[in-house]
Image (spheres, coloured by chain):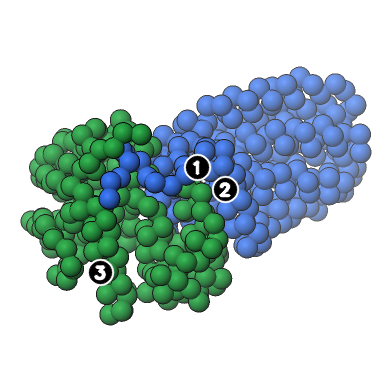
Chain colours: A blue, B green
Amino acid sequence: MQYPALGTRGVSVGTGTAMALILRRELTLSLRRPDQLLQPLVFFLIVTTLFPLGLSPELALLRAMAPGILWVAALLASLLAMEGLFKSDADDGTLEQLALSGQSLGGIVIAKTFAHWLVSGAALVLVSPLVATALAIPLEAFPTMMLSLALGTLTLSWLGAIGAGLTVGLRRGSVLLSLIVLPLAMPLLIFGANATDRAIGGDDASGGLYFLAALCVFTCTLAPLAATAALRITLE
Amino acid sequence: MTVCEPRLEVDAVHVWRGDRHVLKGTSLQVGGGELLHVRGPNGTGKTTLLRVVCGLLRPEQGTVAWCGQSITAIRGTYQLALCYASHEPALKGDLTALENLRFSLGLRRRIGDAELRDLLHRTGVAACADLPSRVLSAGQRRRVALARILGSEASLWLLDEPYTNLDARGADLLGELLAGHVAGGGLALVVAHQDLMLQCSIQRLELAA
């Protein structure tokens, strides 16, 4: 029997199909482990409820502190979910198989990170109105707050993908991951909290949102390259 | 598509892991219809050699070529031509055996559920198809990994201690699959500590400490 040159006999799979397959796989896996899905969300809810209890339930004070509390809690909750991005795949040998699947590792990283954002970041955005109500954020500020959180968590997922790619081979990588990602996430906190704050005050928040959007586009385009390179180093 | 004789050539490969010189100028050639049995004491770089061959690990010196071309130059096509089975069966515990196969083989080629079930049937784990692989025994997981290799349609099989956890019938099955693959013109690199009893010609490579 003759083999075709350099290839296989089957019908090859395009990058788009492969990415859709990875996305489905990741979402299926997340739904099978609802505890991992819920942990960061519950963390987010609990941390934000602690502040009114510890400070004072006075509305004016809460309203002034709310953007900061909301954003810090969102950052920490996203970070909590980040470590698992490549960890389980690296532990059971699946990551090697993905790297050898004949598909571009970049496409796989993009699909995995996006799936990860859907179950962590997007879910966080969806529960944020609950938290916002508890922090006395007015209803008019909700759209700006949710949009800024969506942009911020997506950016953070990408930063986290780089960090997770670098630390996946380490035994106690989670602390190092925080040390890598948190400094990079500071602009998000500044612009995100600022946009939310302005929206609460009834001012125009588009400046902060534009900055967040720019950061989001920046990481969406360049972070896949960095994360893929980091993973390749880890795989060696 | 031009047809070329599949051929793997590893030439004077050196790999250092930290201070240890793991592979010291290892060379090997495998052509279509040939099986190379890699042996050697623990820690002599058998797994490292397989990782170099599949391109996961870049050697400090030396080249790996497939069909006369460097594997770094033809990464995508080379990866489709090979199938690597590491120590780990690479199964997700929360996915069923069938889903595991669907997601890993689905990245390589279009494949339907009927064919996937047939693969599991051929490796003797048809009954486990819809069980989460976390409840499977180590041997059953190994058989699911075998189904993945079988379904990969790769011409180059790289198997790292494939006999681990397999029962006597499983070992016979693996022998049959290997012999069939080689008889069909395929190539195989097998790392194993025991003698291979196969109905095909076997080359040997001994790695020394």
Residue B49 on image: x %, y %:
21, 49
- Residue kind at label 1, given as amino acid type: Val
Q: Do the CB atoms of the residues marked 3 and 1 lie less than 8 Å apart?
A: no
Residue pointed to by mark 1: A13
- Residue kind at label 3, given as amino acid type: Gly
- For the question of whether residue A172 can be seen, the reply is no
Residue A139 on image: x %, y %:
91, 38
Q: Do the CB atoms of the residues marked 2 and 3 lie less than 8 Å apart?
A: no
Q: How many marks?
A: 3
Residue pointed to by mark 3: B175
Q: Residue at x 57, y 48 (%)?
A: A21
Q: Residues within 10 Å of mark 2 (few under 14, many from 20)?
A: some
Query: Disc number at residue B29?
Result: none
As measured in the structure, the alpha-carbon distance from the residue carrying label 2 to the one carrying label 1 is 10 Å
Q: Residue at x 25, y 38 (%)?
A: B4
- Location of the C terminus of chain B by quadrant is bottom left
Q: Label 2's element?
A: helix
User: Mark 1, chain letter?
Assistant: A
Residue B50 against residue B198 in the figure, above or below: above
Quarter where residue A218 is shown = top right
From this viewpoint, which residue is outermost toward the front?
A1
As measured in the structure, the alpha-carbon distance from the residue carrying label 3 to the one carrying label 1 is 30 Å
Question: Image check: A4 left or right of A173?
Answer: left
Question: Image check: A121 left or right of B132?
Answer: right
- Front-most of residues A39 and B78: B78
Question: Image check: A27 left or right of A226?
Answer: right
Residue pointed to by mark 2: A21
- Residue kind at label 2, given as amino acid type: Leu
Q: Label 1's element?
A: loop
Q: Residues within 10 Å of mark 3 (few under 14, many from 20)?
A: some
Residue A79 on image: x %, y %:
59, 45
